[in-house]
């Protein structure tokens, strides 16, 4: 799954670019989460407030650990029971996790993706990716590459084509501390 298209997309991410790629339900808009300029460009393109925070997706939990507070074994087991898969968790963030990722919160939304292309992209990058729906705020999320091109076209540095995972709704978001569902899937 780590073919030339994935390597080209990873190169765009490493160069500070914005990319679109398929995820479990819709196309994601992403970039390197450690690149403040790229994240702010993504937020401007989406017309999304920095205060809302963003989701990071990863190929495995190890890619997310630098952004999160250390977890107790029961919490790690709870996550492992749902990953990889379409479950996003709000987990306490390290104080060093940039505000441009967590917004006004002390948590960070994270997911170990089960989508093979998205996971391959995270592996090729060597780190997690910002993952927000590939659309401008208030518009429907794109489910096919053509819809991404129509909405965001020239604003992207790369579009990685492929099928979405077939989920009808965005992933559910649950708070690890309380178990409360913040957004149903």
Image: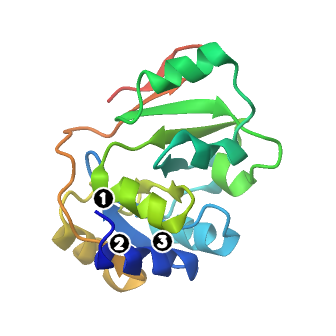
Horizontal and vertical percent for residue 180?
51, 16
Of the numbered discs in the image, which one, if any, rests on residue 79?
A: none
Viewer-nearest of discs 3 and 1: 1
Q: Which residue is mark 2?
A: 6
- The residue most toward the bottom is 154
Q: Determine whether the residue tagged by mark 3 lies in a helix, strand or loop.
A: helix
Please say if 30 is above or below 8: above
Q: Upstream in the sequence, badge 3 or badge 1?
A: 3
User: Residue 118: which quarter of the image?
Assistant: bottom left
Residue 185 percent coordinates (x, y):
32, 30
| Residue bearing the label numbered 1 | 117
Q: Nearer the viewer, mark 3 or mark 2?
A: 2
Task: Using a 10 Å C-alpha cutoff, classify the residue at mark 1 as few (fewer than 14 neighbours), some (14 to 19) or many (20 or more).
Answer: many
Tag count in the figure? 3
Relative side of 146 to 114, left or right: left
Q: Are marks 1 and 2 in contact (CB under 8 Å)?
A: yes
Q: Residue at x 42, y 83 (%)?
A: 157
Q: Which residue is mark 3?
A: 45
Circles 3, 2 touching at the beta carbon (< 8 Å): no
């Amino acid at each position: 799954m780590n073919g030339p298209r994935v390597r080209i997309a990873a190169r765009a991410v490493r160069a500070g670019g914005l990319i679109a790629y398929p995820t479990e339900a819709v196309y994601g808009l992403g970039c390197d989460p450690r690149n403040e300029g790229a994240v702010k460009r993504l937020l401007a393109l989406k017309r999304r407030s920095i205060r809302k925070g963003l989701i990071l997706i990863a190929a495995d939990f190890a890619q997310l650990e630098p952004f999160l507070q250390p977890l107790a074994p029961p919490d790690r087991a709870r996550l492992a029971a749902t990953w990889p898969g379409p479950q996003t968790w709000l987990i306490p963030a390290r104080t060093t996790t940039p505000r441009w990722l967590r917004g006004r919160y002390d948590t960070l939304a994270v997911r170990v993706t089960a989508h093979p292309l998205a996971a391959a992209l995270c592996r090729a990058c060597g780190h997690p990716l910002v993952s927000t729906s590939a659309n401008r705020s208030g518009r429907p999320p794109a489910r096919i590459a053509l819809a991404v091109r129509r909405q965001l076209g020239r604003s992207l540095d790369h579009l990685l084509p492929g099928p979405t995972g077939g989920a009808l709704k965005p992933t559910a978001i649950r708070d690890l501390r309380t178990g409360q569902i913040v957004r149903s899937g």
